């Protein structure tokens, strides 16, 4: 009887020590998991800020051109291409806003590529400084077409 009690105590102590080892391992794994989640959150935050800065840079570099088709030749000499563009926007899209678009970086006529003797008017290319202005104009044009 004494031997069986001693064996049971030994087996209980062995089981108890194994449980303690398992609990220590679990606590170490939980601590490591907390560290990993913190690192992952930091990485996600850095990634998000990098994506935002990349998006801003891309918006500045991205082609922000609008082509105006059908403006008669010589009209830009009298008024200037920027003024023509602002008149077209004000005339066709009155609901776009009271504030005129003054963020024009460059405006010019496209040279003839196919046949310079052709009498069709050349396109005017307007390069805007912000992609948001172009998006507003295109959105207003789509709404007008609907």
Image (cartoon, rainbow, N blue to C red):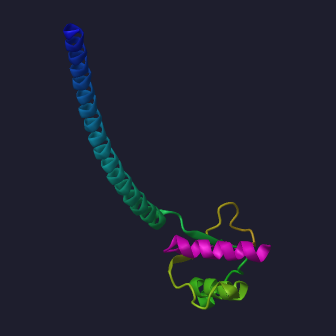
Residue 82 locus on image (x, y percent): 57, 84
Residue 14 locus on image (x, y percent): 22, 19
Residue 60 locus on image (x, y percent): 45, 67
Indicate the quadrant containing the N terminus: top left, top right, bottom left or bottom right.
Answer: top left
Q: Is residue 109 visible?
A: no
Q: Is residue 136 left or right of residue 53?
A: right
104 w.r.t. 98: above or below: above
Q: Is residue 17 left or right of residue 34?
A: left
Residue 51 locus on image (x, y percent): 42, 57
Q: Is residue 135 magenta?
A: yes
Residue lying furthest right: 146
22 w.r.t. 113: above or below: above
Please tell me which residue is depicted at 30% across the width and 40% down the height of the picture: 30
| Front residue of 102 and 71 | 102
67 w.r.t. 12: above or below: below
Q: Is residue 54 left or right of residue 93?
A: left
Provide the residue span drawn in magenta.
121-146
Number of marks: 0
Indicate the quadrant containing the C terminus: top left, top right, bottom left or bottom right.
Answer: bottom right
| Front residue of 13 and 73 | 13
Residue lying furthest front: 1
Please tell me which residue is depicted at 38% across the width and 53% down the height of the picture: 44
Please tell me which residue is depicted at 70% across the width and 63% down the height of the picture: 115
Q: Is residue 136 visible?
A: yes
35 w.r.t. 75: above or below: above
| Front residue of 143 and 46 | 46
Q: Is residue 70 magenta?
A: no
């Amino acid at each position: 009887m004494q031997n069986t009690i001693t064996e049971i105590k030994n087996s209980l102590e062995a089981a108890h020590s194994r449980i303690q080892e398992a609990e220590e391992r679990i606590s170490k794994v939980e601590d490591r998991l907390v560290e990993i989640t913190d690192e992952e959150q930091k990485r996600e935050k850095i990634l998000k800020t990098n994506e935002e800065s990349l998006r801003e840079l891309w918006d500045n570099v991205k082609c922000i051109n609008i082509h105006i088709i059908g403006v008669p030749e010589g009209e830009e000499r009298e008024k200037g291409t920027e003024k023509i563009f602002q008149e077209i926007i004000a005339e066709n899209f009155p609901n776009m806003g009271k504030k005129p678009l003054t963020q024009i970086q460059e405006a010019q006529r496209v040279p003839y590529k196919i046949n310079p003797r052709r009498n069709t008017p050349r396109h005017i290319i307007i390069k805007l400084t912000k992609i948001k202005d172009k998006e507003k104009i295109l959105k207003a044009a789509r709404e007008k077409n609907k």
